[in-house]
Image (tube, rainbow, N blue to C red):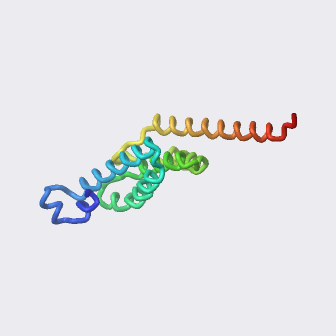
Amino acid sequence: MFSLLSKRPKLQDMLKTSVRDARAVESRLLLASSTMSRFHGALQNALTTATYLNQLVKPCEEAGVDISAAVRLESANVLWGQGEMTASIRMLHDLKRSTASQSQLVRVGKPELLANLVGHDIGLERSDMSTDFFQGTSNFSG
């Protein structure tokens, strides 16, 4: 609905809203939808939503709404849920290195970003350790 609103000037006039407001609401709702999908294990829906959000970054910027950091964080979380651990950690590292602007619609704070990064790093280490453990025991002849 908000996607339609952001594309139709006549609707915006009728509802007394702007493209910026429509894009902002649309982005927040899509971010929340992706988060809820991940929470409920609907990973394909979360991936679809994150992909759509990535396509919205440029139109949102054109409307004066910066969602790039929040979209990258959500995309990294979706990738982690899909088992793409290395890509997820790489995205979080890139996000950490980038300077988050004050104009972000949804601010991605350093504490949240670092908590995700540390949690993902620990999860990856555990995964590597369990793989090593099981590979070592498969050669056991007893």
Task: Report the quarter where the N terminus lies.
Answer: bottom left
Q: Residue at x 24, y 53 (%)?
A: 21
Which corner quadrant of the image does residue 138 belong to?
top right
Q: Residue at x 70, y 37 (%)?
A: 130
Image spot of residue 16 (x, y percent): 14, 56
Which residue of the protein is positioned furthest toward the front in this rendering? 142
Image spot of residue 32 (x, y percent): 36, 45
Q: Nearer the viewer, residue 1 or 58?
A: 1
Image spot of residue 44 (x, y percent): 47, 53
Q: Nearer the viewer, residue 33 or 61?
A: 33
Image spot of residue 92 (x, y percent): 53, 45
Relative horizontal placement of residue 64, taking residue 127 as reference (left or right): left
Which residue of the protein is positioned furthest toward the right in this rendering? 142
Q: Residue at x 14, y 61 (%)?
A: 13
Q: Is residue 52 above or below residue 130?
A: below
Q: Nearer the viewer, residue 48 or 125?
A: 48
Q: Residue at x 55, y 45 (%)?
A: 93
Figure label count: 0
Task: Report the quarter where the C terminus lies.
Answer: top right
